[in-house]
């Protein structure tokens, strides 16, 4: 099918984009990489009056280290994340997560901010943002505010942005050098939507787990932080962890659903197993560093 | 409904037109510009048949608006062979390895492999196979395409069975 008619503007600054969204009065839709929006337009599941294309706004692109961590411009392409030396050092788990998004050809257009803002429950980036306590900066003609990723997701494809707000930056706090990363995704084929997955990081200080950030994707209406598992891990020595107990606590925080790909029970069972296996592999890999 | 004046380079030739904002790059390349080597399959980014090279990168042309390619350099399958008809190395290796049957998915496969091996890049076999996961082929069972990818990566192709 072909999209219904719409108007199109391509602002070159954040200020212009915010004005266009304010003028759109809720009938405007933002176009980032287009790898989700354009299929929805083609299928006429989305019929906006006006599209505000962000692809010409240079100030929305790029990866930079800041005092608070690493700031990623929302229009940074997913392929740029994979190629980034800064991110390979600072946030290796983010790079690993992005490798699992779609395919090479869609990562060449797809953006970090697009995936973060969309809030697909089975997507890798929203869960990564939640696990790592990222902060999402939103701007409108009314001003700028920062939203913790943990407060950003309200439901499937529903986020805390107002209709006139635009994501203008995503900041990930830094993790100590040599931290341990966890990533595992279960999908029927490479590039398919994940049935479920786990993402996060751990750091060990003085022989004890000092920091933990873990979240699930595909295990509920939004990314779900595995708080119970984090509590069970903090302050423990990595060799004194009962993997099965922690895995049970990790799954206890989830709210998986039945769909035609997998049942909720399947997701819980596989979730428990991949949690235990991923944690064991990450902790033993960490000892080698 | 807005109309836009756009100008892009397609296979080395300048092309200007006025398009409605809703026209996809794939429909523009086929209909307006006449490059029917761009095959339109699913129109929602799953099948990979419409893959073209935009500013050096393989992308789904059904997931870009034509207006977004204003100022871009676009290469389609028609732009690969030499003027004397000599096939591009990717086309030749796909032919040699019998990597096509009906040919519907082939232009997309060709463009992904051409983008990844352009400008002297030396992708690994794993990188090429991973990129091929973005293409659906309903005829070949993929083995010929995989052999071609192995050959492009500099590996000896496995024996044909």
Image (tube, rainbow, N blue to C red):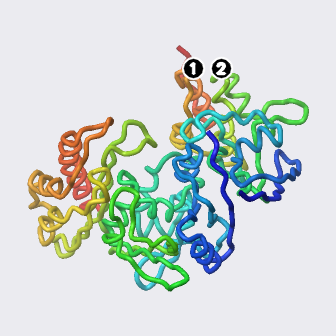
Task: For the residues labelled 2 and 1, say whether their Cβ atoms are less than 8 Å apart.
Answer: yes
Label 1 marks a residue whose chain is B
Q: In which quarter of the image is residue A89?
A: bottom left
Residue B22's spot in the image, x, y percent? 68, 51
Q: How crowded is mark 1: few (under 14 residues within 10 Å), some or many (20 or more)?
A: few
Residue for point 57% across, 20% down: B139
| Earlier sequence position, callout 2 versus callout 1 | 2
Residue position for label 1: B139
Query: Tag 2, which secondary structure?
Result: loop
Local secondary structure at mark 1 = loop
Q: Is residue B79 above or below residue B104?
A: below
Measured Cα–Cα span from mark 2 to mark 1: 7 Å
Is residue A262 or residue A112 the one in the foreground? A262
Apparent side of residue A121 relative to residue B41 in the rendered image (left or right): left
Q: Which residue is drawn at 32% across and 35% down?
A: A260
Nearer the observer, A203 or A31 = A31
Residue B73 located left or right of residue B137: right
The C terminus of chain A, quarter of image: bottom left
Q: Name the residue: 58% across, 23% down.
A: B144
Dividing the picture into quadrants, the one containing residue A48 is bottom right
Quarter of the picture holding the N terminus of chain A: top right
In the rendered image, residue B87, in percent from the top left (x then y), is placed at 79, 30
Chain bearing mark 2: B
């Amino acid at each position: 099918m072909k999209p219904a008619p719409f108007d199109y503007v391509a602002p070159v600054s954040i200020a212009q984009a915010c004005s266009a969204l304010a003028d759109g009065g809720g009938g405007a839709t933002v176009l980032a990489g287009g790898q989700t929006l354009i299929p929805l337009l083609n299928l006429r599941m989305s019929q906006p009056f006006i599209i505000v294309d962000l692809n010409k706004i240079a100030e929305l692109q790029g990866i930079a280290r800041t005092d608070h961590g690493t700031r990623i411009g929302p229009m940074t392409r997913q392929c740029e994340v994979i190629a980034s030396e800064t991110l390979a050092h600072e946030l290796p788990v983010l790079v690993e997560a992005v490798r699992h998004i779609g395919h090479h050809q869609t990562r060449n257009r797809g953006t970090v901010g697009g995936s973060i803002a969309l809030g697909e429950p089975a997507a890798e980036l929203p869960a990564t943002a939640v696990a790592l306590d990222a902060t999402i900066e939103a701007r409108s003609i009314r001003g700028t505010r920062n939203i913790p990723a943990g407060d950003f997701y309200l439901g499937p494809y529903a986020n805390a942005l107002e209709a006139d707000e635009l994501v203008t930056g995503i900041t990930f706090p830094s993790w100590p050098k040599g931290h341990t990363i966890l990533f595992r995704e279960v999908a029927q084929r490479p590039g398919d939507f994940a049935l479920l997955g786990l993402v996060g990081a751990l750091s060990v200080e003085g022989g004890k787990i000092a920091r933990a950030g873990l979240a699930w994707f595909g295990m509920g209406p939004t990314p779900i932080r595995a708080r119970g598992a984090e509590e069970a891990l903090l302050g423990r020595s990595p060799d004194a962890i009962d993997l099965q107990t922690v895995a049970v606590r990790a799954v206890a925080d989830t709210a998986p659903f039945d769909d035609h790909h997998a049942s909720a029970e399947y997701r819980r069972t596989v979730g428990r197993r991949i949690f235990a296996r991923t944690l064991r592999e990450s902790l033993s890999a960490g000892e080698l560093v | 409904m807005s109309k836009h004046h756009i100008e892009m380079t397609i296979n080395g030739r300048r092309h200007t037109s006025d398009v409605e904002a809703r026209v996809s790059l794939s429909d523009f390349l086929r209909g307006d510009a006449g490059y029917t080597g761009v095959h339109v399959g699913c129109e929602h980014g799953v099948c990979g048949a419409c893959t073209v090279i935009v500013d050096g990168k393989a992308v789904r042309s059904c997931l870009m608006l034509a207006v977004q390619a204003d100022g871009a350099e676009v290469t389609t399958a028609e732009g690969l062979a030499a003027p004397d008809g000599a096939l591009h190395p990717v086309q030749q290796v796909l032919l040699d390895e019998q990597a096509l049957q009906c040919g519907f998915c082939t232009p997309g496969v060709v463009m992904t492999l051409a983008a990844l091996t352009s400008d002297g890049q030396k992708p690994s076999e794993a990188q090429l196979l991973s990129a091929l996961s973005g293409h659906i082929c309903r005829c070949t069972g993929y083995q010929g395409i995989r052999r071609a990818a192995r050959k492009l990566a500099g590996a000896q192709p496995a024996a044909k069975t």
